[in-house]
Image: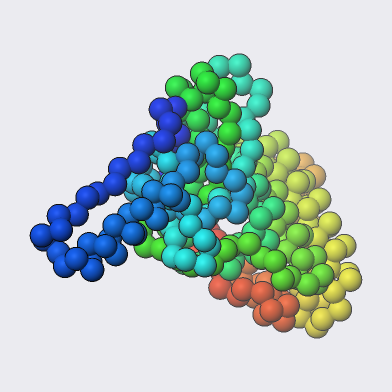
Amino acid sequence: MFLGVTSRSARGMSVAVALLAIGAVGCADAIDSAKAGAKKVVRQRSVFSLTTGDCYNPNSEATASEEFSVEIVPCEEAHEGQVVGEFSIEGESAYPGDDGASKIADERCPAESQKFISDTWAIPKGVDLFYYYPTSESWKTGDRSVSCTYAMETGTYSGSLQNKSLNADQLAYLKGANAVYEALWSNQPEAEDVEKDLAGYKKQAKAVSTALNSHVTNLKGVDQPETVKLRTQLTETAEAWEDAATAGTTDDFYIAYDLAFTGIDPNKTVPARKELKLATTVPADDAEVWAG
C-alpha cells in the first residue's frame, strides 16, 4: 500500500546550488535563476527539524534511500509532500534496522496521519504515504523521530491536506469510519488462511465489531436520511462481525465474515458521504480490495 520510504542521514544538511553560466543565457534569465536558487537555499531545512504541517520538496527523488535536507515551501505553492504526523520510536534499546524502522512506521503512520487529515478520501490522486525514519548513524546520536508524510512520487500538488472547516456531523462520521478501517488493517493476522490462525481472525473481528458499534453510536446524532440508512446497515454489519468474533468453528467464521466484510464495503458509504458533503471517490487501494 505504501509506495516508498525515506531514511534520514546523520551527516547534517547538504545544500548544492547550481551556478549558471551568464554567457549561456540572457542576463534577465540569469538574475531570475539566481534569485530562485537563493530562495531555495534560504528555504532549506534539515530533515531532523521537520514538523507536522510542513509542506516541502525533497532534494532528491521521493523514494531515495537517504535524505539530508528538504526545501520548505508555503503550502499554497506547488510541492511534492507535506508532513502529516510524527512520533518517536520507543522501547528499542538498539537500532531496529531499516526493515524494523520501516515496519514501525508502517504500523504507526496511518493512525498518526489521521490526526491531521480527517478525510483521507480527499487526498489528491497520486499522493501516497511516505516517511522519514532514523538511519543507524543518526540513531547513535539519539535520533528516534519518524516523520509521516503524504507525497507524490512524480509531480506536485498545491494546498494543505489538513481539513480545517469540517462541521460536527462530518467529524462524527469521519472519526468513526477511520476507526473502523484502522481496526481492520491494524489487526490483520499474519496467516492468509483462517484455518491457520482462527484465533487471530477472531481477534480482528472483535476489534472491528467494537469500532463499528462506536461508529454507530456516534452517527445517532446525525439526522440525515442517507446517513440514517447507513447507520441501520452498519448496525447489522456490527452484529455480523461479533458473530465472526465468537465463531466456534472455521465454517461458522466464514459464514459470518462474508456478511461482515461485505458490510463495510466503502462503496456503500458514498451516498452518506455525498449527503454530508465529503469526498465521494473511493481510494484506489480500497476499491481494489472490495472489488474481489
Residue occupying image coordinates x 77% and y 41%:
248
Taking the spot 70% from the left edge, 36% from the top edge, the residue there is 199
Q: Is residue 197 left or right of residue 203?
A: left
**Residue 120 position in % (x across, y down):** 61, 62
Model colouring: rainbow
Taking depth in this image into account, of 222 and 158 the one nearest to the observer is 158
* Along the viewing direction, whichever of 91 and 43 lies nearer the viewer: 43
At 76% from the left and 60% from the top, the residue drawn is: 176
Q: Please identify the residue farthest to the top as the structure is shown.
A: 93
Label count reads 0
Q: Where is residue 132 in the image (x, y as percent from the top left)?
A: 49, 40
Left or right of 206? Residue 32 is: left
Nearer to me, 145 or 209: 145
Q: Residue at x 89, y 71 (%)?
A: 221
Instruction: For residue 185, say whether it is visible.
Output: no
Quarter holding residue 66: top left
Q: Is there any visible trace of residue 10 in the rendered image?
A: yes
Residue 282, picture quadrant: bottom right
- Would you say 228 lies left or right of 50 here? right
User: Horizontal placement of 177 versus 12: left or right?
Assistant: right
Where is residue 140? Give x, y as percent.
51, 18
Q: Is residue 9 above or below residue 136?
A: below
Which is nearer the eye, 264 or 143? Answer: 143
Image coordinates for residue 117, horizontal then vertical, percent: 64, 59
